[in-house]
Image (tube, rainbow, N blue to C red):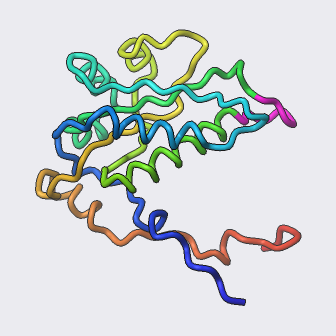
Amino acid sequence: MAVPSVHELILRRRSGRAIASDPVDRGTIETMLEAARWAPSSGNAQPWRFVVVDEQPALQEARNALKPGNKTWAASAPILLIICANPADDYDVNGQQLYLFDSGLAVQNLLLQGIHLGLVVHPMAGWDEDAMRQAIALPLPYRIMCVVAAGYPAPITVLSEELQKRETAVRSRKELAEIRYFNRWSS
């Protein structure tokens, strides 16, 4: 059986770190958010909310909430997109926290649209929750699901030597045979 080819946009997606500080217009940002808005969600709950941080001093305050490893390269990103959700808005099926999954689907749409628009879009999990919550004035009970740094590509020479190596490393994924089963789980 022939395997259909994977869409080139998915294959081009990479969590780049060489981001220019050049501003990104609000129309481009809105297009990414519109793509995220159309993500599927359990029971059509659409639990995600987006805080766009693209102006000083709010941008610096949000950058300061990033963990040190992310601060080193994300300091030049002109946009931080903070994806949030309220656990109380969860669509409960079998006790699973589907708002997390749903938010991830929205983030993937946002990433792919950003790549399509020629941006570097890098999702992160490294931030100080309390500091970021304060930086964006996030009310309880909302939680931060993901932070995405976005901007136009910069030459990789703006990065440290270590990050340049990571930036140019060959992307790898587990082989499909390692992660796929038909009909029943088998080892």
Residue 180 placement: quadrant: bottom right
The percent position of residue 118, horizontal first and vertical second, equals: 31, 54
Q: Is residue 143 above or below residue 32?
A: above
- Tell me the chief SS of the magenta region: loop
Q: What are the residue bounds of the magenta stretch?
A: 91-98
Return the residue found at the far bottom: 1
Q: Is residue 95 above or below residue 10?
A: above
Residue 12 placement: quadrant: bottom left
Residue at (56, 78) in percent of width and height: 5
The percent position of residue 139, horizontal first and vertical second, equals: 52, 9
The percent position of residue 66, horizontal first and vertical second, equals: 33, 30
Return the residue found at the far front: 27
Q: Nearer the viewer, residue 77 or 134?
A: 77
Residue at (53, 48) in percent of width and height: 108
The quadrant of the picture occupied by the N terminus is: bottom right
The percent position of residue 100, horizontal first and vertical second, equals: 64, 35
Left or right placement of residue 131 versus residue 180 in this view? left
Residue 112 is covered by the magenta coloring: no
Residue at (22, 40) in percent of width and height: 72
